[in-house]
Image: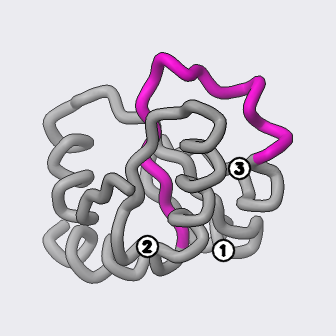
Amino acid sequence: MKEITAKELAEKVKKGEEVNIIDVREDDEVAAGKIPGARHIRLGDIPDSFDKLNKNEHYYMVCRSGGRSGKACEILKSEGFDVTNMTGGMLAWEDEVEVEG
């Protein structure tokens, strides 16, 4: 499975690169904050969302700590999608990215 750190993904966002970020956390978790521009699709809804995603695009998967997004990567990869898991999830994003401001 391809992986990227929160810092590396933040750099791509900061540089203005077009990144497709999918946050697979539950509604209440996302309500507390998410990466700007991230799309919210709960992990349980991923199998019903294949038709809303483009196999020609690359997706970065995010959750709270990296576990659920890893599962989402496995599901999407098995269907032919190009995906990368953000290691450490939003906990790493909050620690490594938001602190820098």
Q: Quote the CA–CA distance across marks 2 and 3.
A: 15 Å
Disc 1: CA contacts within 10 A as few (<14), some (14-19) or many (>=20)? some
Q: Quote the CA–CA distance across marks 1 and 3.
A: 12 Å
Q: In which quadrant is the N terminus drawn?
A: bottom left
Q: In which quadrant is the C terminus drawn?
A: bottom left
Which residue position holds label 3? 41
* Label placed on residue 95: none
> Circle 2 — which element?
helix
Residue 86 lies left or right of residue 42; in this view the side is left
Residue drawn at (57%, 55%), measured in percent from left and top? 74
Q: Which residues are magenta?
A: 47-63
Specify which label sits upstream in the sequence, 1 or 3.
Answer: 1
Labelled pair 2, 1 in contact (Cβ < 8 Å): yes
Residue drawn at (45%, 35%), measured in percent from left and top? 82
* Label placed on residue 29: 1
Residue 31 in the image: state x and y as whole percent. Answer: 67, 67
Q: Quote the CA–CA distance across marks 2 and 1.
A: 10 Å
Q: Indicate whether 33 appears above or below 95.
A: above
> Which amino acid is tagged 1?
Glu
Specify which label sits upstream in the sequence, 2 or 1.
Answer: 1
* Label placed on residue 90: 2
Residue drawn at (74%, 73%), measured in percent from left and top? 28
Q: Indicate whether 22 appears above or below 25.
A: above
Viewer-closest of 95 and 66: 66
Q: Point out the frontmost of discs 1 and 3.
A: 3
> Which amino acid is tagged 2?
Met
